[in-house]
Amino acid sequence: MTLEGTNTYVVGADPAYVIDPGPADREHVGVVRRVGEDRGGIAGVLLTHSHADHSAAVPMLEVPVLWGEVSSEDELALPPGADGRALAADRIGPFEVLPTPGHAADHVCFLLDGVGFCGDLVLGRGSSIVLPGGGALVAYLDSLRRLREGNLELLCPGHGPWIPDPRERLDEYRVHRTDREERLLAALEAGERSRERLLDTVWYDVPEPLRPAAAVAMEAHLEKLGTEGRLPADIVD
Ligand SMILES: [Zn+2]
C-alpha cells in the first residue's frame, strides 16, 4: 500500500518545513534532521493526513506540528470522507492548504509555487485507497477536481515517484473511478445483485491478492450510488 515507503519532503530554507516525516524510523529521522539543519533549521512539520505511515516520526523529530495531527492508526482504520470539515483553503507558512478529504477525512494538500504536495490523494503509481463511510468517494472525486483547478506543474505524492503531468494524472484518476461506476451500473441494470459476482464483473482485471482491496473499493462505490438513489435495495452477498 505504501509502494517503496513514505516520501518525506524538506521544503525551503531559513527555515525549512518538513512535510510528512513518515514512520518512526530512527535512521530516516536522522537524515531528515540533518537536511533540515543544512537548510537553516526546521520551522515545523506539516502533515497531509494523520495516518501513521506519514506522521509517526513526529515525536522523534522534536519540532512543532504546524498542520495536522499525529495518529497511530493506519490506512484502514480512520474514518474517511469529509467529516463535515470546512473546505475553505487556508495558509500555513509559505504554503496554501487545500482541504482534500476522501482518502482520510483530515487529508489536505500543500501548494507552493506550482507544486502540490498531495499525500495519498494521488500516488506516484497505482491508485489511492478510498474506504466506504461518510461519503468518502464523493468527497474524494471532488478533491481531485479541486486540486486540478490549482493548475499545478508538479505533484509530489506521499508514495512513489513525482508526477510531472498533474492534470493528465488527475483526469486519469477521475476516469478510473467513473469507469468502474459505469460498469457497476451496467451490471446492476443487467439484473446482477450478488456482491461476489458484481466484483467479478466490474473488477475483473484485479489480481487475486488485491481482491479484498477491490471489495472495499466496491463498497465505497455502492455507498455513493446509495446516497444518489441509484442503488437497488436487493443487493446480496
Ligand atoms: Zn494514508
Image (spheres, rainbow, N blue to C red):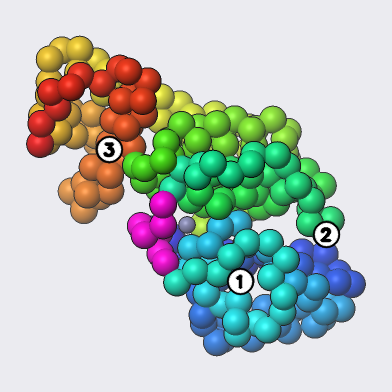
Q: Residue furthest top?
A: 189
Q: Nearer the viewer, residue 34 or 192?
A: 192
Residue 61 point in image, percent of width and height:
65, 82
Question: In percent of the image, x 41 and y 57: which residue is there?
Answer: 78
Q: Nearer the viewer, residue 12 or 42?
A: 42
Work out whether 19 lies above or below 230.
Answer: below
**Element type at mark 3:** helix
Q: Is residue 27 left or right of residue 66?
A: left
Q: CA distance from mark 3 to mark 2?
A: 38 Å
Region in magenta: 73-79
Q: Find disc 3 in the rendering and name its residue.
A: 219
Question: In percent of the image, x 63 and y 61: which residue is there?
Answer: 68
Q: Find disc 2 in the rendering and name its residue.
A: 93
The disc labelled 2 sits on which kind of residue? Gly
Work out whether 166 lies above or below 63.
Answer: above
Q: Is residue 97 magenta?
A: no
Q: Is residue 182 left or right of residue 237?
A: right
Q: Is residue 68 left or right of residue 223?
A: right
The disc labelled 3 sits on which kind of residue? Glu
The disc labelled 1 sits on which kind of residue? Pro
